[in-house]
Image (cartoon, rainbow, N blue to C red):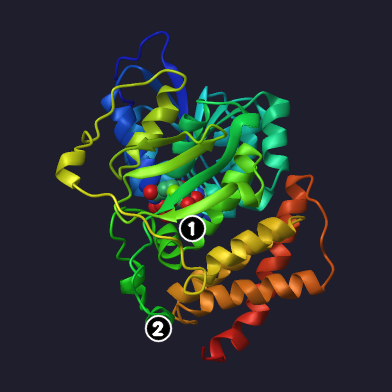
C-alpha cells in the first residue's frame, strides 16, 4: 500500500538520485526525521531493487528508477499495488531527475551521475551536489548551465559546504584563498613502499568517515582530495593557486576561507555527512539536525600537517590537470574511475592507481586533444575516450612494479 503519511500542503518536493548509497542513506535519514515537511517525488538506485522499493514505499515516492535495465520486472513486482510508477535504465534515472521537484540530491557515484544531475540543473532546481565526479567531468560548463537555468547548486561535499558557508563572510575581491582539509586517510603515516602494496581491506578502513567504496579508496589515495580541489575550482570559480589542502586528521574543521584582512573563517562540525546535507536541505534556512553536537573540550586537540605530494601523487596530478584544463580534469576523473575499479578487481596494486592516471593524462596530452568542453556530449565523449585509453594502458601498468 502507498504510504499514508501526512504531508503538509506547503511541503517541499524532493528527489534523491542514488538513494540507496551512503549519502542517499544520510539524506533519507534527514527526510525521515522531518516527516510531513518534505514530499518525495522520485528515488533512484543502480541495482539494489529491494532497498529502492523499500524506500519508495516508506516515503510514498511518486516514481522509482533503477539504472540496471534488467531489473525492471523485479522492481515492478516489488512495487505492485502501491501506485508508485517505476522505470529502468539510464533514461529512467534521467527522468527521475527531470520530474518536477524543488530540491534534488545528486548522490550517484561517478561520472554516471552527470546526465541525471544536468537534467535537474536544466529545469532550474535546487541541486544538492554530492557527486563530485560529475562536476570534475563536466568542467566549467556545468556551473554555466546552472546559472543559465537559474538552478542553485548547493555543495553537499563537507569541505565545499564549509567553504559555501564561510565564503559569505566577504566578497570575491576580498578573498585570498580557500583551504580544504583532508583527514589524510588510512595511509597518512605510511611509508611510500607500504602504500604501494596496500590491500583493498586496508584501503577501505577510513579513520573518520563511513562512505561508499569508491570514495573510501579515493580517500586512501588522496585522489578524493584532488577531485575536491578541482570541484572547489569549478564550484566557486577559483584558480588552482587559490585552493590549498591542509591535512587535519580529526576531520573537525572542514574548510576555511582566508580574506584580505587576514581573517580566516572556518566551518566546524563532527565528521557526519548529515551536517552538510542538512545545510543543503534547509538552505537558505537552517533545520534542526540529528547529529551529535561538537564537544571540542572532549576532542582536546586539533592538529594539522602539510599534504605530501610525493607519497600521494594523485593530489599533484589533480592540480596539474586543473592547470592544464581543456578536458584534462575529465581525463583525470575517468582514468581514476578505471584505476579504482581495476584495484578493486585485483588487477593492479594500490600504488598503480596514480600511475595509471598519470599515464592516461600524458597519453591524452601527447595526443593533442586539448579543447574546452562546452556540452555534456563533449564531456561524455572525452570521458569515454579516456576510459578506453586507461583500459588500454592498464596491462602495462599492472606489470610494472614501482
Ligand atoms: P555509494 O556507492 O554508497 O552510493 C552510490 C549511489 O549511486 C547508490 O545509490 C547507487 O545505487 C547509485 N549508483 C551507482 N552507480 C550508478 C549508476 N551507474 N547509475 C545510477 N545510479 C548509480 O556512494 P556514496 O559514498 O554515497 O557517494 C555518492 C557520491 O557522493 C560520490 O560522488 C561521492 O564522491 C560523493 N560524496 C560522498 C561522501 C560520503 O560521505 N559518502 C562525501 C562527500 C561526497
Ligand atoms: Mg569531501
Which residue position holds label 2?
A: 197
Residue under the point 77% across and 45% down: 375
Distance (Cα) linking label 2 and label 1: 19 Å
In this rendered view, identify the residue nearer to me: 128 or 313. 313
Dot 1: element: helix
Residue under the point 59% across and 39% down: 176
Which residue position holds label 1?
A: 224
Q: Position of residue 370 (x, y in %)?
A: 81, 61
Does the beta carbon at disc 1 come under 8 Å from ligand 2? Answer: yes
Image check: 211 left or right of 113? Answer: left
Q: Say whether disc 2 or disc 1 marks the residue closer to the N-terminus.
A: 2
In this rendered view, identify the residue nearer to me: 125 or 53. 125
- Name the image quarter holding the N terminus: top left
Does the beta carbon at disc 2 come under 8 Å from ligand 1? Answer: no
In this rendered view, identify the residue nearer to me: 152 or 321. 321
Q: Position of residue 126 (x, y in %)?
A: 55, 26
In this rendered view, identify the residue nearer to me: 113 or 233. 233
Q: Is residue 308 above or below residue 117?
A: below
Amino acid at each position: 500500500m502507498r504510504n499514508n503519511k501526512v504531508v503538509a500542503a506547503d511541503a517541499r518536493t524532493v528527489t534523491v538520485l542514488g538513494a540507496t548509497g551512503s549519502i542517499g542513506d544520510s539524506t533519507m535519514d534527514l527526510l525521515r526525521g522531518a516527516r510531513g515537511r518534505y514530499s518525495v517525488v522520485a528515488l533512484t538506485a543502480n541495482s539494489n531493487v529491494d532497498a529502492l522499493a523499500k524506500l519508495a514505499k516508506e516515503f510514498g515516492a511518486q516514481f522509482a528508477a533503477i539504472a540496471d535495465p534488467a531489473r525492471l520486472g523485479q522492481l515492478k513486482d516489488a512495487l505492485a499495488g502501491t501506485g508508485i510508477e517505476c522505470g529502468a535504465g539510464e533514461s529512467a534515472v534521467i527522468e527521475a531527475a527531470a520530474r518536477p521537484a524543488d530540491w534534488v540530491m545528486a548522490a550517484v557515484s561517478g561520472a554516471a551521475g552527470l546526465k541525471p544531475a544536468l537534467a535537474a540543473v536544466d529545469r532550474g532546481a535546487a541541486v544538492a551536489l554530492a557527486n563530485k565526479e560529475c562536476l570534475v567531468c563536466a568542467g566549467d560548463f556545468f556551473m554555466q548551465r546552472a546559472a543559465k537555468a537559474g538552478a542553485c547548486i548547493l555543495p553537499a561535499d563537507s569541505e565545499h559546504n564549509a567553504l559555501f558557508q564561510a565564503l559569505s563572510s566577504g566578497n570575491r575581491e576580498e578573498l585570498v584563498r580557500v583551504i580544504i582539509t583532508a583527514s589524510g586517510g588510512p595511509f597518512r603515516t605510511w611509508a611510500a613502499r607500504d602504500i604501494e602494496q596496500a590491500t583493498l581491506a586496508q584501503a577501505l578502513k577510513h579513520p573518520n568517515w563511513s562512505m561508499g567504496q569508491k570514495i573510501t579508496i579515493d580517500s586512501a589515495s588522496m585522489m578524493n582530495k584532488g577531485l575536491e580541489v578541482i570541484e572547489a575550482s569549478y564550484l566557486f570559480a577559483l584558480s588552482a593557486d587559490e585552493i590549498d589542502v591542509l591535512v587535519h586528521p580529526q576531520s573537525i574543521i572542514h574548510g576555511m576561507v582566508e580574506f584580505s584582512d587576514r581573517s580566516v573563517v572556518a566551518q566546524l562540525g563532527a565528521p557526519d555527512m548529515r551536517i552538510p546535507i542538512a545545510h543543503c536541505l534547509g538552505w537558505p534556512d537552517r533545520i534542526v539536525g540529528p547529529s551529535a553536537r561538537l564537544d571540542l573540550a572532549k576532542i582536546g586537540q586539533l592538529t594539522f600537517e602539510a599534504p605530501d605530494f610525493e607519497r600521494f601523487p594523485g593530489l599533484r596530478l589533480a592540480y596539474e590537470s586543473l592547470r592544464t584544463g581543456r578536458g584534462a580534469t575529465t581525463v583525470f576523473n575517468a582514468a581514476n574511475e578505471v584505476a579504482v575499479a581495476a584495484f578493486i578487481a585485483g588487477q593492479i596494486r594500490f600504488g598503480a592507481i596514480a600511475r595509471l592516471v598519470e599515464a592516461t593524462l600524458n597519453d591524452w596530452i601527447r595526443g593533442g586533444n586539448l579543447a574546452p568542453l562546452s556540452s555534456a556530449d563533449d564531456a561524455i565523449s572525452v570521458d569515454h575516450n579516456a576510459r578506453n585509453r586507461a583500459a588500454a594502458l592498464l596491462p602495462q601498468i599492472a606489470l610494472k612494479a614501482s
